[in-house]
Image (cartoon, rainbow, N blue to C red):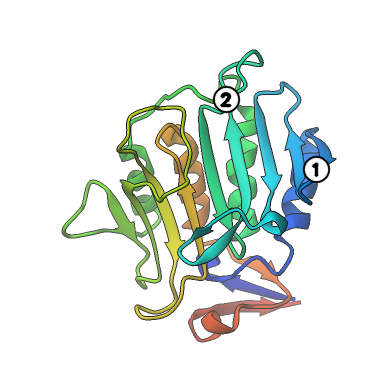
Amino acid sequence: MYWVTPRHLAGDDGALAERIGDALTDFGWRMWPTSHDTLLYVSTDGLCWAEWILASYPFELGGLPVAWQVSARSGTDSAMAEWNAYFTADVPHEVLADFLLALDARTAPDAEFDGPDVVLEELCSRGWLRDADRPRTTAFDPGFSAGVSLELTPPLVRDADPYPVQVGWQAWAQPGLDEPYLWCASFSASVPNDLVAVFASSLASPTPVPRRTLPACTEDRISIIRQS
């Protein structure tokens, strides 16, 4: 077992489905397998759900298939999700679990409490750097191997807001400038900024995370703090 940092390059240890599934079960969310070979988890109040959709291969972010889709609605009488968030494999499971924990604690998962500045403030408080050209919308880790940016959402990212041009938070890890992405995440336009800020804060946390295996593409950029 390795304890490593930074966590945005640590991958998911090949256990993203199991770790997030266990977390959701601990929250009391109910799970059903679907006819599309996916696993659907629904919160106790019925307002939020998360689905492991990697087997159905619905679409890609940054050339990577989406693994988890997280959704929320305003009330149980509404069939449409107010917002959606999408995560590929190798997103650190600790970061996604923290996002889901914050979502589970919300009584109104679609309510907005903070402006977009709260996301970048969380990142900068943990040593990330604002982009010189886009200081109000984009920040990078000090090694420039991961970023979080408020920009146009990718195709197929769904949101209840009918406005045709959507802007939402996007996050990614890319070990090298010309290398493939390690993971990507996309938040639709209506995802509350304070929830994205929880994701960002966990992503930038300096606390080491345990891993049995490391992504081959990040081995030379990972620091092993200790072994156990």
Classify mark 1: helix, strand or loop. loop
Residue at image position (67%, 40%) is 50
| Furthest residue toward front | 35
The picture quadrant where one finds residue 98 is: top right
Query: Label 2 to label 1, Cα distance in Å?
Result: 18 Å
Query: From this viewpoint, is residue 205 visible?
Result: no
Judged left or right of residue 152, residue 201 is right
Residue at image position (45%, 34%) is 194
Position of residue 105 relative to residue 88, above or below, is above
Judged left or right of residue 82, residue 20 is right
Mark 2 is surrounded, within 10 Å at the Cα level, by few (under 14), some (14 to 19) or many (20 or more) other residues, namely some
Residue at image position (36%, 59%) is 127
Counting residues from the start of the chain, the first of labels 2 and 1 encountered is 1
- Which residue lies under the disc numbered 2? 80
Mark 1 is surrounded, within 10 Å at the Cα level, by few (under 14), some (14 to 19) or many (20 or more) other residues, namely few
Between residues 18 and 102, which one lies in front from this camera angle? 18
Judged left or right of residue 166, residue 12 is right
Residue at image position (39%, 46%) is 169
What amino acid is at disc 2? Met
x then y, percent, for residue 103: 60, 33
x then y, percent, for residue 11: 60, 69
Query: From this viewpoint, is residue 212 visible?
Result: yes
- Which residue lies under the disc numbered 1? 34
Q: Which corner quadrant holds the N terminus?
A: bottom right
What amino acid is at disc 1? Thr
